[in-house]
Amino acid sequence: MAEIEKAYEAVELAKRTGKIRKGSNEVTKALEKGKAKLVVIAKDITPPEITMHIPVLSKEKGVACIEVPSKEELGAAAGLGVGTAAVVVVQEGDSKKVIAEISK
């Protein structure tokens, strides 16, 4: 549970003070380019194929990938009025400490 809260906190902090990208395509691109610092994906995405490749790619690139239960909450943390399948932090800003804790 604490890990999920930290994931939302990292996304919110990075949104305010760093840079985030939203959506599974943007997350995939950031991972492939080696720019991802933290990946957060929502479990309640239909169909699951949309985000299935992301944890595998994250592992390959050595980036922490956190699953959160709700796309709505993830969207809210990212400052969106709608849910989102995935968010990637590309510049940590003030979320650096939180991401370091998650990555342990």
Image (cartoon, rainbow, N blue to C red):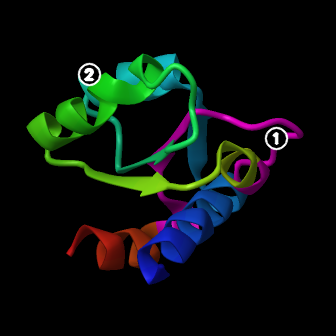
Q: Position of residue 14 (x, y in %)?
A: 59, 58
Q: Secondary structure at mark 1?
A: loop
- Whether 32 is drawn above or below 40: the answer is above
Q: Where residue 71 is drawn, which disc sits there?
A: none
Q: Which residue is drawn at the image coordinates 72% and 55% (left, top)?
A: 73
Residue stretch rendered in magenta on the structure: 76-95
Q: Which residue is drawn at the image coordinates 67% and 62% (left, top)?
A: 12
Which of discs 2 and 1 lies nearer the camera? The answer is 1
Q: Which residue is drawn at the image coordinates 47% and 83% (left, top)?
A: 2
Q: Which class describes the residues within 10 Å of circle 2: few (<14), some (14-19), or many (20+)?
A: some
Q: Nearer the viewer, residue 61 or 83?
A: 83
Q: Where residue 80 is drawn, which disc sits there?
A: 1
Q: Residue 44 lies in what quarter of the image?
A: top right
Q: Which class describes the residues within 10 Å of circle 1: few (<14), some (14-19), or many (20+)?
A: few
- 75 relative to 46 in the view: left or right: right
The total number of labels drawn is 2
Question: Which residue position holds label 2?
Answer: 32
Q: Label 2 is placed on what type of residue?
A: Glu
Distance between the Cα atoms at labels 2 and 1? 24 Å
Looking at the image, is mark 2 or mark 1 earlier in the sequence?
A: 2
- Whether 55 is drawn above or below 27: the answer is below
Q: Label 1 is placed on what type of residue?
A: Leu
Q: Which residue is drawn at the image coordinates 46% and 19% (left, top)?
A: 50
- 65 relative to 46 in the view: left or right: left
Asked if the stretch drawn in magenta spans residue 91, the answer is yes
Q: Residue 49 lies in what quarter of the image?
A: top left
- 103 relative to 16 in the view: left or right: left
Q: Position of residue 97 (x, y in %)?
A: 41, 78
- Whether 67 is drawn above or below 32: the answer is below
